[in-house]
Amino acid sequence: MVHCSRHKNNGRAAIEYHYHPDRLNFPLKRVGERGQDQWEVISWDQALDEVAEKLNYYRDTFGAESVAAATGTAHYGDYTWTKSKFLNLFGSPNNHGNEAICHGPQTKAYESTLGWAGQIWLTPGVTNTLVLNSNQRESAPVCFAAIEGVKASGGKIISISPRFGNVSMLADYYLPVRPGSDGALYLAWLNVIINEDLYDHEFVEKWVVGFDELKEFVQPWTPEKAAEICWVSADMIRETARVYATNQPSRIIAMQSYDGQAPNGFRTLRCVAMLEAIIGAADNGCPVAGPVNPDVFEDDYHAERNDMLPWSQQVKQIGGDRFNVLGFPGWKLLGEGQLRRYGTAMYTHWSNQGHAPTMWRQILDEKPYPVKALIMTGCGALTKYSNTKLVLEAFKKLDLIVVADFFPNANTAMADYVFPMSDWMERPLMESYGASLMANVACGMNAVEPLYERRSDYDFWRGLGIRCGQEEYWPQETLIENHDYRVKGTGKTFEEIATHEKCIAEPLVHLGYQKINPKTGEAYGFATPSGKAEFHSEVLEKLGQDPLVHYEEPNFSPYSTSEYAQQYPYILITGCRVQPFYHSEHRQIRALRDLHPDPIVEVNPETAQALEPPLVDGDWAWIETHLGRIKMRVRVSTAVGVGIVSAEHNWWFPEDDPKLPSLYGAFKSNINVVLDDDPDKCAQELGGYTNKNAMCNIYKALV
Ligand SMILES: Nc1nc2c(c(=O)[nH]1)N[C@H]1C(S)=C(S)[C@@H](COP(=O)(O)OP(=O)(O)OC[C@H]3O[C@@H](n4cnc5c(=O)[nH]c(N)nc54)[C@H](O)[C@@H]3O)O[C@H]1N2
Ligand SMILES: Nc1nc2c(c(=O)[nH]1)N[C@H]1C(S)=C(S)[C@@H](COP(=O)(O)OP(=O)(O)OC[C@H]3O[C@@H](n4cnc5c(=O)[nH]c(N)nc54)[C@H](O)[C@@H]3O)O[C@H]1N2
Ligand SMILES: [Mo]
């Protein structure tokens, strides 16, 4: 329900997916050299026994922190908290994922400002003005339908994006912002809304900490100043700020366009949270959903057993001390207010991660301690992370790589053990986003029993857990028994909910911060340390981060690195979603691949014409940065502005050679091969690396 393409509603493709001849059906153990595609089929018991024996050995010899896990976006609710629970009980703080560049910056920006994650999806019927990037029809079709609803009922749509996409077509205002510069634009919106007195005085006086400081800070940020930085006219900035503030209720839904920006993503999203607050929209029109009541549902925060990992291990988290808003320090400080207000906090899976780019480097130099094993469930490390060749070098150095997945891919090709996972038709699903972005838990029964030896992520982590001394903590033998246990507070079984309501939903409470807590007789307030909306954030200050906001010129930009820009003159945005695919997935599903056979790079006609030789539609082109080059197929399109290049992400070719150095063509067309992840250039707060505002060269590929 959350990421709409995740459950692949295309019926024809679902059947193909389920019975696909390439599916992983049995556990595999590597027999030849790593990366040579030589395997032995073994039983689950043997595979789990052998992996657990090695993990126990690493823990006893090098410390539990020498075992790390990495995951990606959540498909199935049971792979998120199970991994965190295993790690917490095992003693390792090293949980890695995408949150430095996925929704982490947004989540943390809202948490630090308003106490809980902002909703990234649109609730139908509550909006007059919508501010969006441009691609929801591909990335979030349900949200797109709601956007169309807003439009149909006379609402205003402001699309801010360097790429004119399906949302821009509906827009009343289209702002072709320079990639990576949205922060400057929003500072100018704050300037206009404050100076033209368009803000909610009562809210600001009663509920905001740091308003005067912000007011002073944004004074130099006139629309004229922002216009020079953002490439959007001052008049347009002024007019859209007024529309946003006056044509209420208003929402800003930015999604990965800001999350994927370094160094500004987090700060830009702090501006967004402050804008929602000063116009009086905080917790109104539901940007702050809050969690599902933990008395009714055992949420992920509790299921993860975060109480079990001692501080002495937490401090060993890789990159957690440096990129501390996403690491343990920030998670714990933000959690204090949340526990007070809601009785629960954001779960670690998404909200507390180590820094993957730092981990690859630590695997190679073993400082300050060695990392021996990496377990990946739901993680395309060799497709999704920037600087992918470095990731491969790190893989080669690891003693043990374990991958649980549905299909063979570059990661399984480099693994020592591969576990076959059950798909969404075979697994009783409980999507517990109640612990993060939305106040509901979606439930659905499996349609069929798993084929062959496919099992769930719950089975995988529980299987390892009971072999690593955690038996007493995993009492429910099956996933469905565990679901029953977690929904016990509703007085129903999981199957009853999954068959009838299909959801455990909290009634949405508007202006919940104003409601009186019967236990104290005082208003609940926000889940921040002060109980107010914190423009000056106490948590950020304690973490040594900027407690307010500021804007920095991106590391790679026509302005900040003029020498680099001469060699790599085009601004590169990446990862604009396309409907048949979910990140690296579905390239082997004929029904879907036929819709979109090649990796596409979009180039403006003027840019394409000016190249020597010129690029025409259907050409293959090299995209090059200081890290090398990859090849994609050209679409000449006015959707992107002159000088901007938009490349798809996470491409590989299941039809290619599985062995090294090819690894299913993982280095041929994946834009991440040429994107930088240097920790010194990462965003200070969460360690985000840039995949929305890099620089590149592009030229015709003659072969
Ligand atoms: N089909 C499909 N759907 C998906 C996914 C998928 O892989 N496939 N992935 C899911 C996941 S995990 C995520 S995080 C979401 C992401 O969801 P979205 O954020 O909607 O992702 P994109 O499609 O990348 O859209 C980003 C938009 O931002 C624009 N953009 C790029 N750079 C900038 C910039 O600097 N400023 C501004 N203002 N705009 C910019 C791009 O032109 C693009 O239109 O999608 C989810 N949905
Ligand atoms: N250049 C660039 N790179 C990007 C992005 C971008 O916009 N531009 N977007 C980034 C973002 S926002 C994200 S979220 C990441 C996505 O990164 P990932 O989520 O890691 O996506 P994939 O690379 O598709 O790898 C996921 C793997 O997990 C498997 N899998 C899926 N669900 C499950 C499950 O429930 N259990 C198990 N065991 N396996 C499962 C899939 O088959 C697949 O092989 O990519 C990031 N990378
Ligand atoms: Mo994401």
Image (cartoon, rainbow, N blue to C red):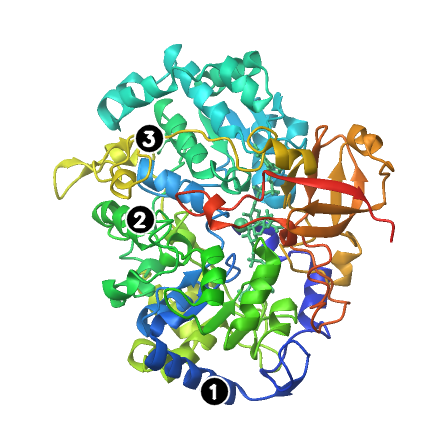
Q: Amino acid at mark 1?
A: Glu
Residue 392, numbered label: none
Considering only vertical position in the picture, is 495 above or below 509?
A: below
Residue at mark 2 to residue at mark 3: CA–CA distance: 16 Å
Secondary structure, mark 2, is helix
Ligand 3: does it lie within 8 Å of the C-beta at label 2? no
Marks 2 and 3 in Cβ contact (< 8 Å): no
Q: Amino acid at mark 3?
A: Leu
Residue at mark 3 to residue at mark 1: CA–CA distance: 50 Å
| Front residue of 685 and 42 | 685
Figure quadrant of residue 637: top right
Q: Residue furthest front?
A: 563
Please rate how many residues cluster around mark 3, counting C-alpha atoms within 10 Å: few if below 14, some from 14 to 19, many from 20.
Answer: many
Considering only vertical position in the picture, is 166 above or below 652?
A: above
| Front residue of 604 and 639 | 604
Q: Which residue is mark 2?
A: 330
Secondary structure, mark 3, is loop
Q: Residue at x 28, y 44 (%)?
A: 543
Considering only vertical position in the picture, is 28 above or below 76?
A: below
Residue 562: x %, y % from top left? 61, 31
Q: Earlier in the sequence, mark 2 or mark 3?
A: 2
Residue 50, numbered label: 1
| Front residue of 214 and 508 | 214
Q: Residue at x 57, y 60 (%)?
A: 390
Residue 287: x %, y % from top left? 40, 36
Secondary structure, mark 1, is helix
Residue 312 seen anywhere in this rendered image of the structure: yes
Q: Which residue is mark 3?
A: 548
Give the left or right position of residue 362, taking residue 473 as reference.
Answer: right
Q: Earlier in the sequence, mark 2 or mark 1?
A: 1
Give the left or right position of residue 666, taking residue 444 as reference.
Answer: right
Q: Amino acid at mark 2?
A: Gly
